Amino acid sequence: MTDSVYKVIELVGTSKDSWEKAAAAAVDRASKSLRDLRVAEVAELDLVIEDGKIRAYRARMKVSFKFEG
């Protein structure tokens, strides 16, 4: 195995349905502009509440991808 370097960025995904869908939305969107995504770590989960009701689920994630720069 050759030595590699990975960059880590923070993303926040949102969904009206669940935290799982929020995380999936972040990975899906990131995969459209970043190549070779490797690992995603969910760092924080939270909710957007309006008028006493849950309006959105949010997943804050750290995502790594192979650095080619």
Image (cartoon, rainbow, N blue to C red):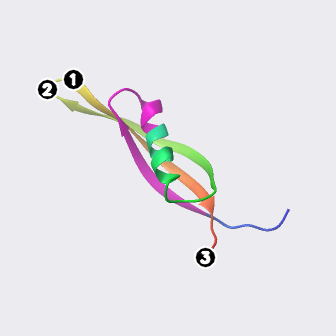
Residues at badges 2 and 1 in contact (C-beta under 8 Å)? yes
Quickly name the residue at label 3.
69
Give the CA distance from mark 2 to mark 1.
6 Å
**Label 3 vs 2, first from the N-terminus:** 2
Q: Residue 22: x, y in percent?
A: 42, 37
Q: Which residues are magenta?
A: 7-23
Image-based side of 53 in relation to 22, left or right: left
Q: Decide if residue 69 is on the left or right side of residue 53.
A: right
Most extreme residue toward the bottom is: 69
Q: Secondary structure at mark 2?
A: loop
Report the mark closest to the observer, 3 or 2: 3
Taking 62 as reference, is 55 left or right? Answer: left
Disc 1, SS: strand
- Residue 38's place in the image compared with 18, above or below, is below
Q: Indicate which disc, 1 or 3, sits on the residue closer to the N terminus.
A: 1
Crowd tier of the residue under label 2, counting other residues whose Cα lies within 10 Å: few below 14, some 14–19, many 20 or above = few
User: Which residue is pictured at 43% across the width and 31% down the height?
Assistant: 19
What numbered label is drawn on residue 51? Answer: 2
Please say if 26 is above or below 16.
Answer: below
Q: For residue 60: magenta?
A: no
Q: Which residue reaches farthest left?
A: 51
The amino acid type, in three-letter code, at marker 1 is Lys
Please provide percent x and percent y for residue 40. Answer: 57, 46
Q: CA distance from mark 1 to mark 3?
A: 45 Å
Work out which quarter of the rendered image holds the N terminus and state it.
bottom right
Measured from the top left, where is residue 13 in percent x and y? Answer: 40, 43
Please provide percent x and percent y for residue 25: 44, 41
In depth, the one of 59 and 65 nearer the eye is: 65
Check the image and name the residue furthest to the front. 32
Amino acid carrying mark 2 in the image: Asp
**Amino acid bearing label 3:** Gly
Read off the residue under disc 1.
Answer: 53
